[in-house]
Amino acid sequence: MASTPQGARKPNLLTAIFQWDKDWASRVFMVTLVFAVVWYIVGAADAMLVRLQESSLGLLGEPITTPWSYYAGLTLHAERDLFGFAQQLEMGIFVFLTIRLLGVEPRAKWLMWTSIILINASIFLFEGPVILSHLSFIDSYFAATGWDSLSPLGVPGYSGYGVSPLWWWGWLALEASTFLWGAWTFYMVAKSHKKLNYVMYYVLGTVILYVMGYAVLAVATNWEMLAYYIPVNINSLYDQFIFWFYGHSIVYMLFLPAVTALYFLVPTLVNREIYSDRLAKVSAILYVAFSNIVPIHHLYNAVFPYWVNILQEVMTYGVVVPSMMTFFNLWATAKGVKQITWSVPAAFTAMSFAGAIAAGVTGVANATVSFDSVIHNSMWVPAHFHAMIMLMIAPGAYALLYILVPWVTGRLWYSVRLAWAHFWLTLVGSVGVVMFFSDEGISGILRRSMIYPRISSIVVDEVGATIFAVIVGLGALALVLNTLQTIFRGRTLDTSKLGVLELVSAAAASTVSGPYSTPEPPKLKVDHRLKLRAEYTWVAVGVLLLALTAVSTLPEAVYVGGAIINVPKAYFDPPVENVTLLAHQYYWNFTVGNTSTLDFFVVNPGEKVLIRGTVAKGNGLANFYMPLFSDRVVDYQLYQEYYSYIWFTAPTQPGVYGFMNGEYNGPFYTYMGGEMLVMPPGGVLSSTQLESYLRSTSSDPYTPPVELIQGGVSLTMSTLGNWNNTVPAPTLIASEGSEVNLSFEVSLSALTSYSNYVFNLTQVNTTKTVEAYLTEHGGRLPFSIELLHINPQGETSIVQSITPTLGTNTLSFRVEPGIYVYGVIQPIAYEFNPYGLSNQFNGYDQGYITALWGAVLVTQP
């Protein structure tokens, strides 16, 4: 362990932390590093709130915070860690590398200082107004929008959930910050007369990608902001199309700096020249060319014709080519090195290299239309993104930080143990988080899901992801502690007389407990012709494999997406059950013929179904998500003013099959469940059919749990406002001709929970509010519990309806053939307006919620 040399003067606290006594590039790097770490810590706290909420709901069935705080945590975790941490840190690193690699004196310094101020200001603006009052439970509520643009979510007149205009001002500040950084970089390159090496190709390419992506984002941001201030019409499909030019390229904005780090570190650590300078430069150009032109890669399930999806699939595959070139180049550079000392920078470099390949494979899968139609909007997507962030991008950044911190501060790493603890905790924790997220995705669990099926395997995934996220956090804590100790107590290093190889070797050696040796340079050079042949062969094999993937998946790809041209011709020939779907804010409306139903629709076994779906004005957007793994995953995006054509064949097995809204449209979006009721022949399940149905429910995550009625069943309202902690409520099995009692338990503690939407609670003393209402209304609650019967011909009738009170409320009936729907069938009006504070500046949320209902299947006695 290093110690401070005798006679060395302790530096001033702020001067030491910000390295204010160093050159300008070092100061910029340290300022961005310090602020990036602060935002990382705050964003990690947001992430931990999300993880604890999901774990608590899985283990205990109880939330630890409100839905809006949960989604605020999810949003702000992304904003703070993606932009406040990752992008800001990239800016600082690239400023430092630009000055060092170009060998120029910095100019136009005000551009970078303004850029740094704006990026930090944007993170504050994203949170929205912080209301200073005793209503602490609404803080950060109106920031719950997701990290991206889900247009027209949040825009008044288009969305029942509205955000503060500070949200868009935050985006404008972030865009301006990026443009200023880009302008400074271009200016410095233009002022330099030095030939750009392959590392600077990646630095410049990354900055170009940032500027291109944010230029497109500025169009979407200004469109939405104009719609907020003046009545400008928004086309949500076009707006999302524009946004996703940025939304896809942001992955590579974060990815390319890690690739830059690998191109800088791998040759240096192994003491060799890069295998192919030409291949490195060409790959940098191809990354810029292909990363910013595939917006529909994220909109395969929208309303685009199949040929557009397939074209975007091929164009997305294009970005795989420079990745194959890059990792072949890096592998060939390190190939044959026998004497290498495993330092922490080397370990993180190897982790980044391996992680890029592992995460990249899932990226190819996501780019494939037929595969994406299965996993889109599921936890598989965050698993892929976190794999890229945690296994490739972050390790690449850490590898570079372990070199740059000693380079900038002039002090070697203080603790070898803390450095290696950081590596191993990061490796183990990151792999664990990605594995559990991936398993949830394979199981069909929606991303952004506060409420999810409490299946034992899913609960294990949720809790496991939380545990491993804590491990990652402990690793980051080790890095922060070691960095602070290094700044104040690390052994001094005179960097003025060292070249790049000596600097890297000295920094790496300070993370090794034993002797450190730099590998000997190679004695033989690779034949130029053999090198070219290897490059061409490798790229050709990769392109061939991608072409085979595209061709082999083409038969399925032509049917993906909601355009009418994508529907198989058989679904236009009778017999077909034609259904019209209108998605409102937090509930569904189906129409079959002259019959209209809320949240469910009825079909016959094996029947072809064609749904014509759209979104009602006032609901930002929706997604019809019905993962029937025994048949096919039905996943279609719905937009205002557009119709998506949703086709599938109903299961041959009669029963109740769940579906969800797969797209976030406000803090209560996971309450927006529904059911497809497959009517048994004659309205009664045989014993064989019942056994088959019970087996099938284990594979479809959103098919509600089943309970057999033995004379009666008890249904308890949870603090989240659903029966028995499931949305929709449990599917009940009753014998034909039996007498059944359904008991609905409603407690004061459930009604007074902030997460319960029934009473629109807007005051701190919720118990007093509810008690006052009950006294005024004779103890009656503000909703009806109904029992609806659907006969075998599909005709509906209300059997019973009661206005419940606190305690036990019972519905008794004799079971007839058909299917019953029970509970609070009519949507409950919801508006969040604490003390009248909701408005267009602070934000608002309103809609109609239905989460207190379920179905009863009838079986033979």
Image (cartoon, helix red, strand yellow):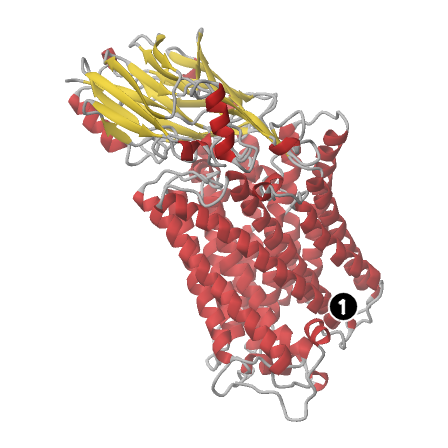
Q: Secondary structure at mark 1?
A: loop
Name the image quarter holding residue 307: top right
Name the image quarter holding residue 722: top left
| In-image side of 747 versus 661 (left or right) | left
How crowded pointer 1 is (Cα within 10 Å; few <14, some 14-19, many 20+) is rated as few
Q: Position of residue 331 (x, y in %)?
A: 51, 67
| In-image side of 287 versus 572 (left or right) | right
Three-letter amino acid code at disc 1?
Lys
Q: Residue at x 45, y 59 (%)?
A: 470
Q: Nearer the viewer, residue 72 or 387?
A: 72
Q: Residue at x 50, y 39 (%)?
A: 67
In the image, is residue 503 above or below residue 626? below
Q: Which residue is mark 1?
A: 195
Q: Nearer the viewer, residue 266 or 792?
A: 792
Q: Residue at x 55, y 61 (%)?
A: 394
Q: How many marks?
A: 1
Name the image quarter holding residue 802: top left
In the image, is residue 602 above or below residue 636? above
Identify the image quadrant of the C terminus: top left
| In-image side of 36 versus 743 (left or right) | right
| In-image side of 163 versus 386 (left or right) | right
In the image, is residue 486 above or below residue 449? below
* Most distant residue in the bottom direction: 6
Q: Nearer the viewer, residue 515 or 221?
A: 221
Q: Position of residue 697 (x, y in %)?
A: 28, 32
Let me know if residue 544 appears in the view. Answer: no
Let me know if residue 634 appears in the view. Answer: yes
* Most distant residue in the left direction: 861
Q: Position of residue 471 (x, y in %)?
A: 44, 62
